Image: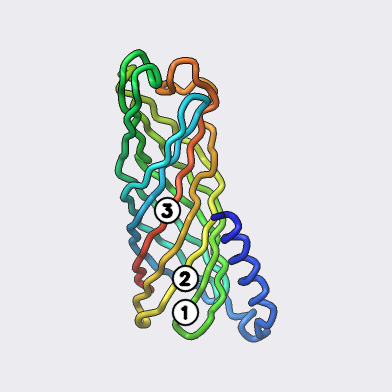
Amino acid sequence: MKKQMFVAAAALMVSGMAPIPAAHAGDMDVKPYMGVGMGAFGLEYKDTAISQKQTVFGGFIKGGAGIGDYFGAELRVGTTSSASKSYVAGTLGAGAGTFKTTATYFVSYLAKLQVPASAELKPYILLGGTTAKFKSTNSSTTTSASKAKTGISYGAGIDYAISDQFSANVEWMQYWNNVKLGTNYATAPAGATDSKAKIWGVVAAVDYHF
């Protein structure tokens, strides 16, 4: 469903770019900004034995630049809190236990395509990559593991200009989508293989424009 929403949003934005005036197409002023975002992040883990989806709090700081009216680039660095799920004996290991996950850090490098809907409102889509350290702990086997991996990232949002210096935005972002953590991930239940993780976020952010 999320992928379908993203594709639909992208199609609408691309179709909206058809009537871009030639005068604006040549306007490539660089407009730097920085900001902070906070909200809900999804941490999803699965292997051949277990599958869990949990929502935690997270946030990031970001810096970027608008390039003309329609393009931009952004770098963001963030982290999430942790969440755990309990399992009965024999699932994670011999005894009952919990499986805890967190994104210790993530770094996203993104290209932005934006289409001004009005002087204040700018819908946008993002495409790029995210390098994140995914950490998990298995209390049943008293093991923990961390993997730094990179995955393709994409998302969409809308930005509202509060003033010449400040804007607020809300967005949905898929940072990781089934990124492989390894065939034999250290904290996976005994005998489990094919460990994968997803990270997504729904946040509100405030930007300062220089």
Marks 1/3: CA–CA distance: 21 Å
- Whether residue 49 is visible: yes
| Drawn side of residue 78 relative to residue 195, left or right | left
Callout 2 secondary element: strand
Q: Report if the CB atoms under discs 1 and 3 are less than 8 Å apart.
A: no
**Which residue is nearer to you in this view: 122 or 34?**
122
Q: Position of residue 91 (x, y in %)?
A: 40, 21
Residue 51 marker: none
Q: Position of residue 49 (x, y in %)?
A: 48, 24
| Of the image marks 1 and 2, the number of the one nearer the N terminus | 1
Q: Which amino acid, mark 3?
A: Gly
Image: 36 above or below 78:
below
Quadrant location of the C terminus?
bottom left
Q: Mark 1 or mark 3, which is nearer to you?
A: 3
Q: Position of residue 26 (x, y in %)?
A: 63, 80
Q: Report if the CB atoms under discs 1 and 2 are less than 8 Å apart.
A: yes
Residue 121 marker: 1
Query: Residue drawn 35% across and 13% down?
Result: 94
Callout 3 secondary element: strand
